[in-house]
Amino acid sequence: VTTILPKRGVRLTVIPPADLEGLERILKTEGATLFFSEQITNPLTRIIDTVKIAELCRQYKVICCIDTTFATPVNHKPIQHGADLVLHS
């Protein structure tokens, strides 16, 4: 992600996925178009607060996209918690 996307003209900022204060600081100062995270993160199995992240994204008009591949859609349904987009494989 940090190697390929900048070569394609995409500006990105990587933060720990559970860092809500860092996310809000970035949304306030740098702005964003999309927030993307896994739920549960792989390989460290960290859990993010989908509801709070979705609320922050909505407040700053940012698309919230959650990848539920590891959690599977059976165990976690981010749309029900405010996410705009959900991915899984």
Image (cartoon, rainbow, N blue to C red):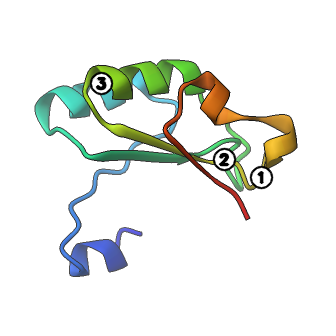
- On-image quarter of the C terminus: bottom right
Q: How far is the residue under mark 3 from the one under mark 1?
A: 25 Å
Residue pointed to by mark 2: 41
Mark 3 or mark 1: whose residue is earlier in sequence: 3
Indicate the quadrant where residue 88 lies.
bottom right
Marks 1 and 2: in contact by CB < 8 Å? yes
Q: How far is the residue under mark 2 from the one under mark 3?
A: 20 Å
Mark 2 or mark 1: whose residue is earlier in sequence: 2
Helix, strand, or loop for circle 1?
loop
View extreme (left): residue: 29
Q: Nearer the viewer, residue 5 or 63?
A: 63
Where does the image place residue 31, in percent across and percent down from the top left?
Answer: 17, 38
Mark 2 or mark 3: whose residue is earlier in sequence: 3
Q: How far is the residue under mark 2 from the one under mark 1?
A: 7 Å
Q: Which mark is residue 24?
A: 3
Task: Report how many numbered discs are placed on residues in the image.
Answer: 3
Q: Nearer the viewer, mark 2 or mark 1?
A: 1
The amino acid type of the residue labelled 1 equals Phe
Helix, strand, or loop for circle 2?
loop
Where does the image place residue 86, in percent across and percent down from the top left?
Answer: 60, 47
Q: Residues within 10 Å of mark 3 (few under 14, many from 20)?
A: some
Q: Which residue lies at the image location 30% right of the left edge and 24% below the top edge?
A: 24
Q: Which residue lies at the image location 47% right of the left edge and 26% below the top edge?
A: 53
The amino acid type of the residue labelled 3 equals Glu
Q: Which mark is residue 88?
A: none
Asked if residue 49 can be seen in this view, the reply is no
Residue pointed to by mark 1: 70
- On-image quarter of the N terminus: bottom left
Where does the image place residue 28, in percent across and percent down from the top left?
Answer: 17, 26
The amino acid type of the residue labelled 2 equals Thr
